Structures are given as structure tokens and as C-alpha cells.
């Protein structure tokens, strides 16, 4: 829950060994049980700051360190049913360390996760 709102969330972190600046994130694609979630519906939280996916490219000076977990939250009335769900997250970002900085890197992970009752969300 985010501010008492119902929904679901997954934790993600950047790959590699250096992390990335938030402005480098070009998109976060989320699919749950084969259904694509609109990027407009995703709330990305890092270090207790919330962003819409479209706002990430404007976050100059904000880094996402390789060991820092971020939360991808999707508001959904009633949340998800408890039990197993297929979850796929695809992160697209500017490749800062490759041959050309204009290259995009795409990292995708697909997992079968089991949803259990969540503890209430609290801001630290």
C-alpha cells in the first residue's frame, strides 16, 4: 500500500556494478499475468521520493546506486489476489558505459511470485 491506497508493488534494482542516474531511465515496462501495465500508472519510489516514469528523465543529479532497491507500485482497487502471479519487469535506460552513450540498454526479468498479505506501507 502507498499512503493507504491499495495496489501491488515489486522491488527492483539496477544491474551492472556502478548504478545509473535516474535521468538515464527511459522506461519501465511491467507485465502482470500477461497484462501490460501503463507507465502512467506506475509510481517509482527511490529513497522515499516518488516519481512517475515520465518524470525520471528530469531527475538530474539523482543517482540510483547498484545496491539500492526501488519500489515499482501500481495502484489497483482491491490489489491483486493472493497466490502466484507471473511478473515481468523491463527497464530501459541509456547505456552510459558502452561503445556510444546514445545506445540503450534493456534489462528484463520475469519471475513467478507469490503474493502474500502485505504489511501497511509506512514512510520512514
Image (spheres, grey):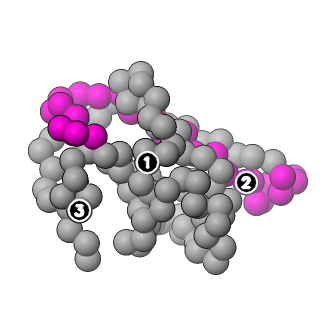
Q: Single out the residue that lies furthest toward the right.
A: 100
Question: Residue 82, located in which quarter of the rendered image?
Answer: top left
Query: Which residue in the protein does label 3 denote?
Result: 3
- 108 lies left or right of 87: right
Which SS class for mark 1? loop
Give percent across and percent down for residue 95.
Answer: 74, 54
Which mark, residue 94? 2
Which SS class for mark 3? loop
Viewer-closest of 96 and 73 = 73
User: Which contiguous range is marked in magenta?
Assistant: 76-102
- Residue 101 shows up from this direction: yes
Question: Residue 100, located in which quarter of the rendered image?
Answer: bottom right
Indicate which label's residue lies in the foreground, 2 or 3.
3
Which mark, residue 42? 1
* Crowd around label 3: few <14 · some 14–19 · many ≥20 (10 Å): few
Viewer-closest of 60 and 19 = 60
Which mark, residue 9? none
Question: From mark 2 to mark 3, how far is it between C-alphas?
Answer: 31 Å
* Crowd around label 1: few <14 · some 14–19 · many ≥20 (10 Å): many
Give percent across and percent down for residue 92.
Answer: 64, 46
Give the total of numbered labels: 3
Give percent across and percent down for residue 61.
Answer: 64, 77
Amino acid at each position: 500500500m502507498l499512503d493507504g491506497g491499495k495496489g501491488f508493488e515489486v522491488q527492483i534494482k539496477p544491474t551492472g556494478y556502478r548504478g545509473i542516474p535516474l535521468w538515464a531511465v527511459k522506461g519501465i515496462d511491467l507485465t502482470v499475468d500477461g497484462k501490460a501495465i501503463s507507465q502512467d500508472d506506475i509510481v517509482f519510489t527511490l529513497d522515499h521520493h516518488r516519481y512517475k516514469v515520465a518524470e525520471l528523465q528530469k531527475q538530474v543529479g539523482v543517482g540510483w546506486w547498484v545496491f539500492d532497491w526501488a519500489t515499482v507500485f501500481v495502484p489497483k482497487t482491491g490489489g491483486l489476489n493472493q497466490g502466484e502471479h507471473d511478473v515481468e519487469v523491463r527497464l530501459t535506460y541509456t547505456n552510459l558505459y558502452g561503445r556510444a552513450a546514445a545506445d540503450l540498454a534493456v534489462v528484463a526479468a520475469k519471475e513467478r511470485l507469490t503474493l502474500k498479505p502485505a504489511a501497511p506501507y509506512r514512510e520512514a
